[in-house]
Amino acid sequence: MSKKNNPNFDFVKILNEDKTYKLLFPKREVGLAIVLIFEKIENKTFEDGKFTEKDLHEAFEQIYITKERYPKEVYSEQIMNFQEYFLDYDQQTQKYYFKDYAYKFCKHAKETLQGAFNPTRIQKICIHLTNTLRNSNDLRFWLEEEFK
C-alpha cells in the first residue's frame, strides 16, 4: 500500500515533527547553495555529478554574501542536515552527490521558473503580429496577409 493511500500516514503531523520541514525545505540561503551546486552539476562542472565538501563550502560562501564570514561549523552543520534528504557521501571517493530528492527539488523549481520566462507559441505569434501591425501602413493588407 502506498503512503499516499495509507490512512495511518499523517502528512502534516510528520512534516511538523522535529526538523522534518526544515530539512525538506531549507531556508533561503541554504536552498540557494544547493541550487548553485545543482547548476554546476547540470553544467558538467563536477565530474560524474560528484563534488567535495570544499565545493559545498564555496557555494555557501558565494550565497552568504555578508560582511562577516560564517565559521566552518555553520556550513558543516548545514551539510550534515543536507544528508537527510539532499546529499549522499561516497566514502571511497570522499565526494558528495545528490539524492533523488535534491534533483527533483531543483528541477521542479527551475522548470516552474523557466515556464514563467519562456514565451509560449501563442505569445510568440502575438508578439509577431503586434510588431508587423506596428510596421504596417496598410491595415487591409495586414489583415489579409499577416493576420490570417
Image (cartoon, rainbow, N blue to C red):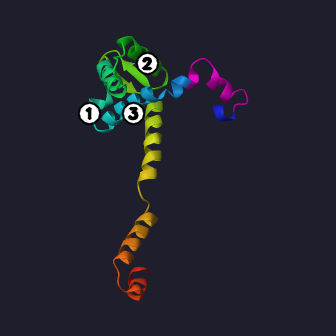
Q: In which quarter of the image is the C terminus?
A: bottom left
Q: Earlier in the sequence, mark 1 or mark 2?
A: 1
Instruction: Name the one closer to the observer, 13 or 89.
Output: 13
Q: What stretch is highlighted in magenta?
A: 6-21
Q: Distance between the residues labelled 1 and 2?
A: 22 Å
Q: Quadrant of residue 8?
A: top right
Residue at image coords 32%, 34%: 41
Q: Is residue 45 above or below residue 135?
A: above
Q: Which of marks 1 and 3 is nearer the N terminus?
A: 3
Residue at image coords 26%, 30%: 47
Residue 51 spot, x, y in % from top left: 31, 25
Kindly identify the amino acid type of the residue bearing the numbered disc 2: Gln
Asked if disc 1 and disc 2 are in contact, CB closer than 8 Å, the reply is no
**Which numbered marker is on residue 45?**
1
Residue 140 spot, x, y in % from top left: 42, 88
Residue situated furthest front in the rendering: 67
Disc 1 element? loop
Asked if disc 1 and disc 3 are in contact, CB closer than 8 Å, the reply is no
Q: Distance between the residues labelled 2 and 3?
A: 14 Å
The residue to which callout 3 is attached is 35
Q: In this view, does 20 lie above or below 6?
A: above
Kindly identify the amino acid type of the residue bearing the numbered disc 3: Val
Residue 7 spot, x, y in % from top left: 73, 30
Instruction: Name the one closer to the observer, 124 or 134.
Output: 134
Q: In this view, does 26 lie above or below 138?
A: above
Give the class, few, some or many, for how many residues have Cα within 10 Å of label 3's Cα (few <14, many ≥20): many
Magenta stretch: includes residue 17: yes
